Image: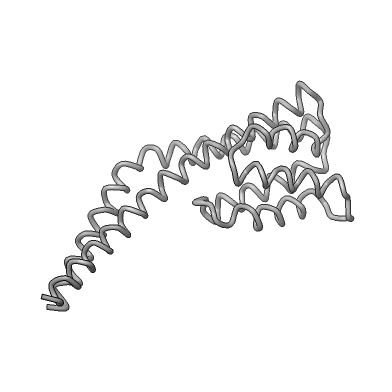
């Protein structure tokens, strides 16, 4: 009786793991869309409001959910303190600190850090061009993820269930 209960728990746990992996994909898609909104807001702040970058980051932060809000606020505060670091360094430090627990992949974070490196040292036109390029990259990632999301979620769920059943059979 105890053995059957343990096998049922094993199957449920692996099915739950498959379900969580599918949810993580959905969450990544949502977070990529937040990054896209962040990029659009920054474009507006730079082009229309003509805000300097620390002020633009602070203003945009108020319109985003956590952890992106805290990320941009910290970047803004660090830039205002100016301790000799470049924008790219400040951006990368804060991305590593505040966005490490998100569902974004390592590649997503690297692209974001790359944006920070390219934003800080050029004129307004080049900053807008880099934001536009980053926006196109985000659009491609969002489109790719959206197309494959239902299939991949179903695959993760199925693999979770099948993996649990396989382990249960092995242990019998």
From the top left corner, tell me how far across and down residue 165 is, in percent: 17, 66
Instruction: Place residue 53 in its image quadrant.
Output: top right
Residue farthest toward the front in the current orientation of the protein: 1
Q: Tell me, what colour scheme is on the image?
A: one colour
From the top left corner, tell me how far across and down residue 41 is, in percent: 66, 29
Q: Is residue 138 above or below residue 44?
A: below
Quarter placement of the C terminus: bottom left
Describe residue 94's horizontal placement relative to residue 86 as left or right. Answer: left
Q: Is residue 93 above or below residue 34?
A: below
Residue at 42% in and 42% down: 145
Residue farthest toward the top in the current orientation of the protein: 48
Residue at 49% in and 38% down: 140
Describe residue 59's horizontal placement relative to residue 122 as left or right. Answer: left
Front residue of 11 and 120: 11
From the top left corner, tell me how far across and down residue 6 is, in percent: 20, 73
Front residue of 41 and 112: 41
Instruction: Place residue 168 in its image quadrant.
Output: bottom left
Residue at 77% in and 52% down: 90
Quarter placement of the N terminus: bottom left
Please count the marks in the image.
Answer: 0
Residue at 35% in and 42% down: 148
């Amino acid at each position: 009786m105890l053995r059957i209960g343990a096998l049922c728990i094993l199957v449920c746990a692996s099915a739950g793991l498959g379900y969580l992996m599918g949810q993580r994909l959905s969450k990544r898609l949502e977070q990529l869309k937040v990054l896209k909104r962040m990029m659009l807001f920054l474009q507006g702040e730079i082009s229309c409001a003509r805000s300097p970058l620390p002020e633009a980051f602070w203003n945009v932060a108020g319109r985003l959910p956590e952890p992106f809000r805290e990320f941009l606020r910290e970047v803004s505060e660090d830039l205002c303190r100016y301790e000799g670091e470049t924008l790219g360094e400040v951006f990368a430090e804060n991305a590593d600190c505040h966005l490490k627990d998100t569902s974004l992949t390592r590649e997503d974070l690297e692209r974001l850090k790359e944006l920070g490196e390219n934003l800080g040292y050029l004129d307004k036109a080049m900053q807008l061009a880099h934001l536009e390029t980053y926006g196109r990259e985000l659009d491609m990632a969002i489109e790719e993820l959206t197309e494959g999301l239902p299939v991949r979620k179903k695959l993760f769920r199925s693999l979770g269930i099948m993996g649990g059943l396989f382990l249960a059979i092995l242990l019998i």
